[in-house]
Amino acid sequence: MFEDINKTYFLLAVVGITLLYLFIRRLKEKTRISISEPGKFLRDLGLLSIVDDGSLMELMLSNVELDKPVARVMSENENQPNVWILDGDLDDDFDSFDYRMRGYITPEGFIYKQFYKNDKPVLVGYTARLKEPNKPTIKGKRSWTSLWLESELYAFEVNPDGSIPDKPLTKRVGYACKSGIAFNGKRPVTFEAKACATALLYQKYGPKEKKNIIYREPVYGWNDTALLTAIVYSVIFMILYFTYTCMLNKPLLGNDFYAVFILYGCYYALWALIRQFKIDSIENSHSIQPHLDMLNKGLGLKRFDSAIAILCSIAAYYIYFFMDYDLLPLIGAVMYGISHNALANKIRRPWKIVTNFDEERNMNDESYEIMPFASMTPPSGEMVRVFDWDLDSSNGRKLHGNLTVHFSMDLYEQMRTENPFYSQDTQKSKHVRVAEMIHRMLNDHIYSERVRYIASYIINEANFAKLDEINRLQFALDFVQEPNIEYVQDRYSKSIQYAPEYMRYPDETLYDQEGDCDCKSLLAGMILYYMGYKVLFISSAIRQHTAIAIEFKENDWLSTVFSSYSSFENAIIVHNHRKYVYCETTGDGFRIGQLVDEMRVDDFETRIEIEKEEE
């Protein structure tokens, strides 16, 4: 195949074109921004692009469906560029964007917060170089390793009294890297300093990160596409191989050892293309991630990976010493894909059958049936929401949840228009309308598809982490608490047009990623119901509050855990000769049995059992 090509010139040409491409990319002006909590690793946030002849800069976040600026740096006063942050939710569907001033940066590199013109500015940070973090400056650091084309600058928080900290590195919250050629030396404040101010103010006063729909590693990583690339490469390689050997009657490589590396290098080029296709599909709301996970999981069992690697090693040895080198690139690509698949942490988990709830529960009750997460088909839809939360355990157990859920806009619109609260008709009582919603969800599987999917995921993660039942319940409760599902009262919610009273179906709450106590309680109740628990939906007209309660038995898990708590009895609700324990769903940090201040369980006069009616 490569007999007529001068290998030296060919390799030099490939290296030269690659270097030229990288150099041209460096010449293109751009400013990259990262943020973090103080003392933690920085995380990429986005790019600061210049528009309107340099008078305005906009920070663009990469996410599934959003394509609008979330931060702006206004240069009306060049000596004091103002930073404006998007006011509201990042996933608003409105065309008009509201921004609120959050602060500004001075030519000395000091960052102030100031929300209104009549506010007194407060010093919150400064910009400096990494090697001189205690010396404020707006000029970034350049080095020969980047051909002096990149300028790096960091943002640091100050002490509460406005002084520079003794250990600035523990206060590092922002980073900006400007690359490319730009003739902006006369500007009072550099691009990288403005970017650092944007990063710091966005981190402190911007929309909550977990409300954003931002894909992080490993979704933007490489490992999960290595195996898929090996499969695609194998197909292309075999077509090429049979074309040469069967149709042209010529060897593909023969004994040309250098050609092996050239053809094997095509694997990496194909890998980059497939990874980019994956990213493009995610950002256009057509994620192939579930299919990638299924593919990687299917060959992710250790015994399969080891067997394939051993067979490939034997084949490579035999081909190298006893045959032409034709198939060596194919063997190398397969081994590389398998090894990366084996190293991925999530792939190490083998398939296993898990019970949906405790064996002592009634397994014959069809109303509790739910498929194991491993065998569930993810709900389909063109819109995506990402949920990210941690277990708030009382005994120090750690568990992190991360789940991507797809939504159908047609179904979403149908639920909203069929919602009993949609018409704002008050002829029916709230109790009746809530009962109608629960009945609809328990009898129409479409209305409960995503809730069952989430319940199965929580069960799967809890079983894998070997959580006890109290932590299993808490992990489900943490899902609906802040900041995963933001607490927003109806009259302040744009997504429901500021309706005075509106209770969302669980799918609506999940899609909006916000809701008041009614919405969050119904969502939590349905998740726990499909996890196999008897749940009570409770509401108080006196306190204007809603929550849920979970049934327990005298000899059950809760009595053992809370036997030493004198206030435990205050969280018990007796309903139809059953005992339930109160669960709060609104803010963050509420554990099972913990009530809001000055609230009593006797205040909840409305009680609805989430239970399928017997036919």
Image (tube, rainbow, N blue to C red):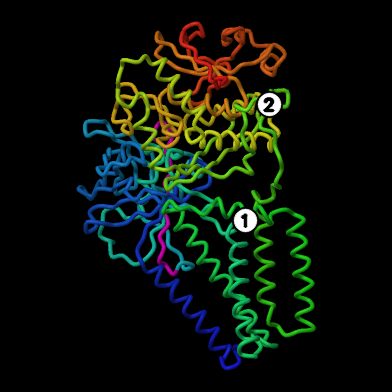
Residue 524 position in % (x across, y down): 52, 26
Residue 354 position in % (x across, y down): 70, 37
Query: Residue visible at 69% across and 78% down?
Result: 327
Q: Does residue 134 appear in this view?
A: no
Q: Is residue 523 above or below residue 93?
A: above
Query: According to the image, label 2 marks what residue?
Result: 364
Which residues lie in the magenta part? Answer: 147-162
Left or right: residue 199 versus residue 474 is left
Residue 510 position in % (x across, y down): 45, 35
The one of 513 and 615 positioned closer to us in this rendering? 615
Q: Is residue 262 above or below residue 71?
A: below
Query: Residue visible at 76% across and 81% down?
Result: 320
Q: Does 151 lie within the magenta span?
A: yes
Q: Does 224 lie within the magenta span?
A: no
Which secondary structure, mark 1?
helix
The one of 475 and 404 positioned closer to us in this rendering? 404
Q: Residue furthest toward the left? A: 76
Left or right: residue 425 versus residue 558 is left
- Identify the mark nearer the N-term, 2 or 1: 1
**What is the number of the mark on residue 352?**
none
Amino acid identity at mark 1: Leu
Which quarter of the rendering shows the C terminus? top right
The one of 120 and 593 positioned closer to us in this rendering? 593
Residue 547 position in % (x across, y down): 49, 18
**What is the number of the mark on residue 295?**
1
Quarter location, residue 554: top right
